[in-house]
Image (tube, rainbow, N blue to C red):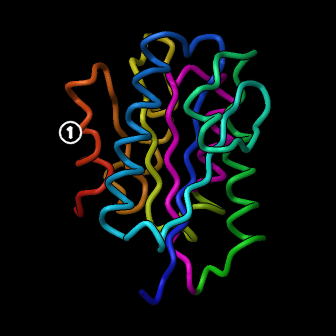
């Protein structure tokens, strides 16, 4: 293929993302990773894994699937880190970028607003697809609501919600089906 694909997986590991939420998050990432490998071919895709609590970290794939919970929540740093890596380490002319964020959506209002700004100004023009999935969102979950105000029915940015494992395929369809 002419283009290489790089997929960035971003997972929330803050205290509020625990137990079943964390298991669902990691299970969905595994399904997406396998789906992309099947469609692109494993030699044409690079998968990179990131987690965040109050800070963002890149981790090895194996560690991503086994990392437990840590401190508080700031999600904007993981979006900044992914955007910086995409622009500094790859050629946008020959690379397809995909980013997927998974978390409970429970962020501070300013953090969510910063993410919307990063998406609009820096990531959306560069990425082929950005998926944001709230996993078992609660009444305090606001990330998808904030993003939807700016990117409702967007061709690049897709919003999903995963409440139980039976919804996995529907969430994948939401993330990848053309509009």
The residue lying toward the viewer, choosing from 74 and 31, is 31
Q: Is residue 134 magenta?
A: no
> In this rendering, would 80 be left or right of 171?
right
- Quadrant location of residue 62? top right
**Would you identify the image quadrant in which residue 124 lies?**
bottom right
As drawn, is 6 to the left or to the right of 113? left
| Left or right: 64, with 142 as reference point | right
Image position, residue 81 (x, y; %): 75, 51
Q: Residue at x 43, y 66 (%)?
A: 42
Q: Is residue 101 above or below residue 110?
A: below
Describe residue 135's horizontal placement relative to residue 82 as left or right. left
Which residue occupies 28% across, 39% down?
171
User: Which quadrant of the figure contains the C terminus?
Assistant: bottom left
To which quarter of the image does residue 37 belong? bottom left
Q: Residue at x 69, y 75 (%)?
A: 90
Image quadrant containing the N terminus: bottom left
User: On the image, numbered disc 1 is attached to which residue?
Assistant: 170
The number of numbered discs placed on residues in the rendered structure image is 1
Q: Is residue 98 magenta?
A: yes
Q: As displayed, is residue 155 above or below residue 65?
A: below
Residue 48 position, x and y percent, is: 61, 53
Mark 1 surroundings within 10 Å by alpha-carbon count, few (fewer than 14), some (14 through 19), many (20 or more): few
Is residue 94 positioned above or below 143 on the image? below
5 or 146, which is in the foreground? 5
Query: As drawn, which residue projects farthest toward the bottom?
Result: 2
Residue 156 percent coordinates (x, y):
41, 61
Q: Position of residue 85 (x, y in %)?
A: 73, 61
Bounds of the magenta span? 94-119
Q: Secondary structure at mark 1?
A: helix
């Amino acid at each position: 293929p002419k283009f290489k694909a790089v997929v960035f997986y971003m997972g929330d590991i803050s205290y509020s993302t625990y137990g079943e939420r964390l298991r669902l998050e990691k299970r969905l990432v595994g399904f997406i990773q396998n789906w992309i490998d099947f469609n692109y071919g494993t030699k044409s895709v690079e998968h990179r894994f990131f987690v965040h609590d109050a800070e963002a970290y890149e981790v090895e794939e194996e560690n991503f699937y086994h990392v437990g919970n840590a401190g508080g929540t700031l999600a904007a740093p993981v979006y900044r880190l992914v955007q910086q890596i995409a622009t500094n380490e790859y050629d946008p002319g020959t690379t397809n970028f995909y980013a997927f964020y998974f978390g409970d959506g429970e962020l501070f209002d300013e953090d969510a607003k910063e993410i919307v700004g990063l998406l609009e100004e820096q990531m959306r023009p560069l990425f082929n697809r950005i998926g944001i999935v709230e996993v078992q969102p609660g009444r305090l979950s606001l990330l998808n609501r904030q993003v939807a105000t700016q990117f409702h029915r967007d061709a690049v940015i897709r919003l999903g919600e995963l409440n139980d494992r039976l919804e996995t395929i529907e969430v994948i369809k939401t993330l990848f089906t053309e509009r």
